[in-house]
Image (cartoon, rainbow, N blue to C red):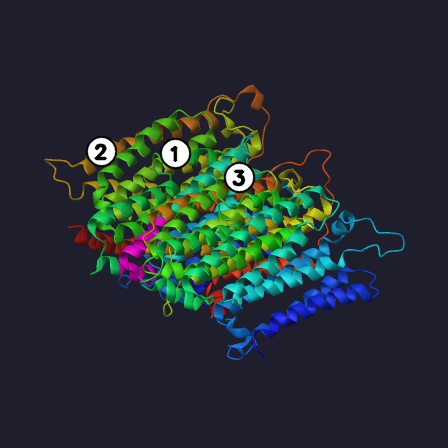
Amino acid sequence: MPVYFLEILVVVLGVLLLLIDAFAPLKDKRALSWLGLVGLGVIFVLLFGVDTTAGESSFWDFYAVDGTSLFFKGLAIVTTMAVMVMGSDFAHVVVRQTAAPEEGAHPQAGLGEFYALPLFTCAGLMWMASAKNLVGIFVSLELVTISFYVLVAYLRRNVGSLEAGVKYLILGALSTGFLVYGFAWLFGITNTMDLAEIRAALSSETVNETGALFAFALILAAMAFKVGAAPFHMWIPDVYQGAPTPITAFLSVGSKAAGFIVLVRLAEPFLVSPILSEQAVLVFTVLAVLTLIVGNFSALPQKNFKRLLAYSSVAHAGFLLTALACWRPEAGSTVSSMQVIGFYLAAYLLMTLASFLALTAIRKANESESFDSFVGLAKRSPFLAFSLLLAMASLAGIPLTAGFIGKFMVFQLALAQGSYILLIVAIIAAALGFYYYLKIAISMYVEEPGKKADLSAIRVSPLTAIALVTLLALIIVAGVQPNLIFALMG
Amino acid sequence: MTILEAIVLFPLLGALVILLGAPARFIAQGCSTLVFLFSLYVLFQFNLGKEGGFQFTSSRTLLEMEGFPTLSLAFGLDGMSAVMLILSTLVLMAATFVAPKENLLNGRSKLYYTCIMLIGAGAIGAFCSTDLFFFYAFHELALIPTFLMIGMFGRGENRTSVAWTITIFLGVGSLVLLVGLLWLVQALGATTFDIEQLTALAQGASAVDADLQKWIFLILLIGFGVLVSLFPLHSWAPAAYAQAPAPVAMLHAGVLKKFGLYGLLRVAMPMLPAGAEAWTNLILVLLLGNILYIGFVTIAQSRLDMMLGYSSVMHMGYVFLGVISVNEIGLGGAILLMFAHGVSIAVLYALCGAVESRYGTLNFDELGGIAKSVPRLGVLFGMAAFASIGLPGFANFAAEVAVFFGAFRDADTNNLGFLQWAGILAIWGVVISAVYMLRAFRSIFMGPQPEKLAQKQGDISLVQAFPVVVLVAALLLIGFKPELLNQFIRPIAHSLETAISVIAK
């Protein structure tokens, strides 16, 4: 089976969900999320059986198949599966916050699309991993972004969600404009849309340096917006806080992973070009330093858990950019920047999804996401508190968790490539992380709940429990046995 | 699976089982006793005739890629780590027996015992690892449990801020350490984290350039220095130990803190001898800060728990003196002192907890004359105090004597060097120890009993005394026959001396 069948299957699954939602009389529409989950699971299994040689030149040579792209497709599918699990836990909030059902309508009207849309996003993310042509990149990126516009603003009767949607739409459209303009310049200079040919053209002696750098700046501005790098990160806290929690998780993991693979693919021609690499590395270094500083320092005073995770996602973008700024090309079996980024993203996916899963489960019992609402959690649900503790430990980079190996490899890369400034900033950033990630542990374990506090036990649905335990186990396994993830990267 | 892997794995498994709901105290005590017996068995099986190198080795490669040093989960023991292993397992066992019964823990016994087991597992794993990565990683394993234990079960009002202080100090210290270790591996051009291979590289042809050694050693000294509370990086320690529940104070002050010294002896000194040489004078000044300055600060304390915290910082100075004398006697003394101090401070913290649970206070002013009602407690405390001062008959004496002899071994008697002068000044530290320990003993156990305290309290039962008695017995045993541990230590001290002095000169 050629690889691109996977994307087609995901789209078919999405359409199927829409059709079932429209025509089948479902009592509980959460069944759609379970169906989506099962379907994605099947596609995930199929991912290991695809024929990587077939269909190499199909799609007018738009579609690349290599170990990295398969790995990122896997990440996209896993993320979407977790979003399905969260979505089923989150159903009651969606129902409450969308328009009131009309007379005679299904009480869960408007819930079906909440499960179908992420599948289209997933297809976009998967395609993005394989895009090797400017057109392919643009189309897949827009598929992802546009479905996110809808999903972010999905809670129609919630002001925060609407505000987040508008902010995301305006800034997202602006960044798309930059991207297209950058593509136009790149095409003008190199006379091609194909990344491999662009790389050759940019490395040649005759390249128009000023024009190329201009294109680079425009593309970088757009991609920095997508991955949430400072100073293009302004939208992140508000959008993350306002969006429905499952969608926040999807944004912070799926969108970031896809953004980074596109960023790496687009930046590589500049980073390997003998004429442009020096400037490109400089720009990435500045961007990484800024992102590390802004992300980590802004996270320190946060009192809302979702905002904290938003700044944490900026902070982690900083570490990923550090790996990019310390560029080490893919050569033989040496660990390349791409592999470090791949591992880091996989680790980031595990721990962020675990945090959001726990948060969604807690959100079922709590109306707010501020730290105060976590007080006494250790008594209300020891399981959730412990899961969150482990996820935070991994995000902070405590050894024997996946998060530590990711940071460790970034440090090692920075040292090996001699970027001492980045190393120092990254160390300071990691030290700050200890504080703001462990702050939540104080709320959960140490602070005494007030007299009026609700201390009823929180019930965790079996699906969420299974997903959480799987993610936590993977965090530990990847932290002790990192080879497994590198083996998946091929 | 080798026996060493089992020793490292068991406490981790114990923690997991407790977390999943098994009877916490029972599992913790059973597991730690089993691990202690295992490590005794390992000590008996240890081949003393073997020259250098690790024994009971095992290695599982976890990550092997070009451009990145190979990562393996590797364990092994040599004379030094054998001593540290028996110290860790001994104190872990005592700590689980000292820990309160489940019904006193307000429904949080699961977390309590899980944390204790994790702290113990971190220490054991760090001392048994022969791979630099896991050597570091296991030590970090203890960080969050310590944070939670002090935050949740700490004794004072400001326990949250104390928990933050220790976590941030140790977290930042470990990050500095991580940079130093990575830089070291990078500078050696190594493709592995295996400590034995790294040492061979560092002492062979690809030794690090002397100028670079100096800077890497400084980073490592700061990193390890924070962990071991080297003056002036010590300020986290006394308050943290004073606030921590007794088992955590025992494990941390007794065992985990030694990781910094162990790291200096295992990594920094043998791999960067020229760097160590370059900073000898600095270290001598700092260790005098530990012994004399902190010594006087200790005298000024008015609470038993704070006094013990400062005294444990102070005694690290002696270990540094042994380390920096870089000869067989001094290094051997330093390793023995790590054991002796670890055991004696564990006893003191266990008894400190016992006093507090009976009288509700640790202020010298409010206590007095309690030996009449709790004679067993008094005797045990007295012995531990004597050990801590370094009176003959206890392991601390044997170790401190070796440290002082080490400082003078190569001395030119007509023209004493800085090392010898530091040794002379450090000896006065013994007097300082005697002042504060005896004063504490007198004001708590002797003299008239204040009226408020008049109510009679029950002495510790034989069952409660058991862990403390075991520890005191260990101190006496090693005090009367230091050879029991010295036979492990001597070869490693000898080879350390040769390795360091040959390269440094």
Mark 2: few/some/many CA within 10 Å (<14, 14-19, 20+): some
Q: Which of the 4 image quadrants contains residue B132?
A: bottom left
Q: Which of the 4 image quadrants contains residue A122?
A: bottom right
A108 up-or-down from B321: above or below: below
Q: Main secondary structure of the magenta part?
A: helix
A52 up-or-down from B494: above or below: below
User: Which residue is more in the foreground, B41 or B65?
Assistant: B65
Pointers 3 and 1 in contact (CB under 8 A)?
no
Q: Position of residue A88 (x, y in %)?
A: 72, 57
Dot 3: what SS? Answer: helix
Q: Which residue is mark 2?
A: B424
Q: CA distance from mark 3 to mark 1?
A: 20 Å
Give the label on residue B311, or none: 1
Q: Residue at x 69, y 41 (%)?
A: A368
**Callout count:** 3
Pointers 1 and 2 in contact (CB under 8 A)?
no
Chain letter of disc 2 in the image: B
Q: Which residue is mark 3?
A: B150
Sequence-earlier tag: 3 or 1? 3
Residue B228 sits inside the magenta stretch: no
Q: Residue at x 38, y 41 (%)?
A: B226
Sequence-earlier tag: 1 or 2? 1
The magenta region covers B179-200
Q: Is residue A490 visible?
A: yes
Mark 1: few/some/many CA within 10 Å (<14, 14-19, 20+): many
Q: Residue at x 28, y 33 (%)?
A: B288
User: Which residue is more in the foreground, A430 or B99?
Assistant: A430
Q: CA distance from mark 1 to mark 2?
A: 19 Å
Dot 2: what SS? Answer: helix
